[in-house]
Image (cartoon, rainbow, N blue to C red):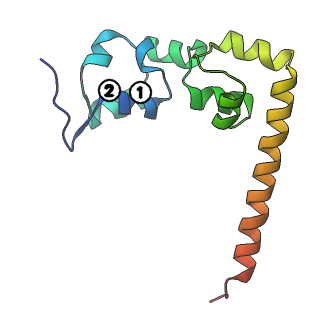
Amino acid sequence: MSIIPSPQAMKSATAAKKLGILLSAAPAEFQENAVSREDFKVLQDTPPEWLAELRRNGPHPRPVIAQKLNISIGGLNRSDITEALTTAEITALLQAPPAWLVEERAVFAQARAEAKLAKEREAARRPKS
């Protein structure tokens, strides 16, 4: 018996995204059933071993890979990183960064600095109330 997604439940893909895990690496029971809000809260507060293992060792979804490498998802695309990576693979990249990773980290840092500057300029232009 599976739970049908409703306002009180979410699809397993949505739950996986919110939990920061790769859906295809999750157990079949998780993949095939909707997740109630209560079950989701339990997964967040007291993750079962399979969830802790996925978060710890992967394989990781693209947003998590980008975050761990400190680059954008666009940087992953430009670097032809299309498959999920494990924590060991990410660590290897960080320990001996290839030229593309050094370049993408610089591009990402520059973009973040420009966004921060734009936000500060916008805040300075707003009238204080």
State the residue position of label 2: 12
Q: Residues within 10 Å of mark 1 (few under 14, many from 20)?
A: many
- Quarter-of-image position of residue 106: top right
Q: For this view, does 77 lie left or right of residue 13? A: right
- Quarter-of-image position of residue 99: top right
Q: Tell me which residue sits at (75%, 66%) in the image.
A: 118
- CA separation in Å, label 1 and label 2: 6 Å
State the residue position of label 1: 16
The x, y position of residue 13, in whole percent, is: 36, 28
Q: Amino acid at mark 1?
A: Ala
Image quarter in which the N terminus is found:
top left
Depth check: give the residue in front, 78 or 4: 78
Q: Tell me which residue sits at (64%, 26%) in the image.
A: 65
Query: Would you say the residues marked 1 and 2 are in contact, meaning their CB atoms lie under 8 Å apart?
Result: yes
Q: Tell me which residue sits at (62%, 89%) in the image.
A: 129
Q: Amino acid at mark 2?
A: Ser
- Quarter-of-image position of residue 105: top right
